[in-house]
Structure formats: C-alpha cells, structure tokens
Image (cartoon, rainbow, N blue to C red):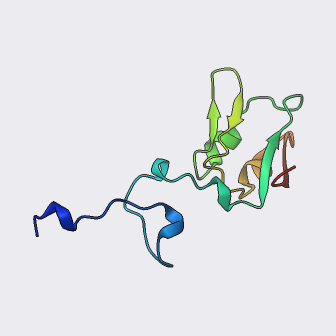
C-alpha cells in the first residue's frame, strides 16, 4: 500500500474516463479548449465595473489594477461575463475569430 511504484503520474483532463472527478486544483488543468465561443472585451465600452470578474465561475477574468482581461487558458466560453456586463462591452464570438 505504501509502495510508490504503484502510484501513477497525474493525467490531463482529456485522458480521464467519462464521469471522473479530478482531485487536483483547476489551475493544474487548462480547460480553455472546451469552448466554442470566446468572450472579447471592447475596451472602449468597458467601465471596469468588475462584474465580469466577480461572476466568472472559472476565475478566467483577471484584473491588473487598471483593466480586466481574459485568461483564455481557463475560459470555457460560458458567456456569463457577457450576460452580466452592464455596458455590453463583452461580446461572445466563435472560437478562432
């Protein structure tokens, strides 16, 4: 039971069987390639209200002290940020555009 040779190295989320739950932090798994749509910020409309940052379920929106920006490595494209934006500064566009 204490033999370390039987312990397997952690795998990425794509290699997990259907229904499996990863035990590591979500920062260990870049899940941005799940999305079909991605949020794009129009900084001309953004008022830095931080609602997108507050409501993002994946903490994929970051703030550098001046403006918010997307961390596409972890954004799954759910669109919540776009829905809560009061100035409609975030538009969901097809991935690859």
- The answer to whether 50 is drawn above or below residue 7 in the figure is above
Query: Residue 73: percent from the left, percent from the top?
Result: 62, 46
For the point 44% across and 74% down, the residue is 20
Q: Residue furthest left?
A: 2
Query: Residue 8: percent from the left, percent from the top?
Result: 29, 64
Q: Residue furthest bottom?
A: 18
Quarter in which the N terminus is drawn: bottom left
In the rendered view, does 3 fall on the left or right side of 38? left
Q: Across the whole image, how many numbered discs are drawn on residues?
A: 0
In the rendered view, does 39 fall on the left or right side of 57? right
- The answer to whether 36 is drawn above or below residue 42 in the figure is below
Q: Residue furthest top?
A: 66
For the point 73% across and 32% down, the residue is 49
Query: Residue 31: percent from the left, percent from the top?
Result: 59, 56
| Foreground pick, 87 / 16 | 16
Query: Residue 37: percent from the left, percent from the top?
Result: 79, 57
For the point 64% across and 48% down, the residue is 55
């Amino acid at each position: 039971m204490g033999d370390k040779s039987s312990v397997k190295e952690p795998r990425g989320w794509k290699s997990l069987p259907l229904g499996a739950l990863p035990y590591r932090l979500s920062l260990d798994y870049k899940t941005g390639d799940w999305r079909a749509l991605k949020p794009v910020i129009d900084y001309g409309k953004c008022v830095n209200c931080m609602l997108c940052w507050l409501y993002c379920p994946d903490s994929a929106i970051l703030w550098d002290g001046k403006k918010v920006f997307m961390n596409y490595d972890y954004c799954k494209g759910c669109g919540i940020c776009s829905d809560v934006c009061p100035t409609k500064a975030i538009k969901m566009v097809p991935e690859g555009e």
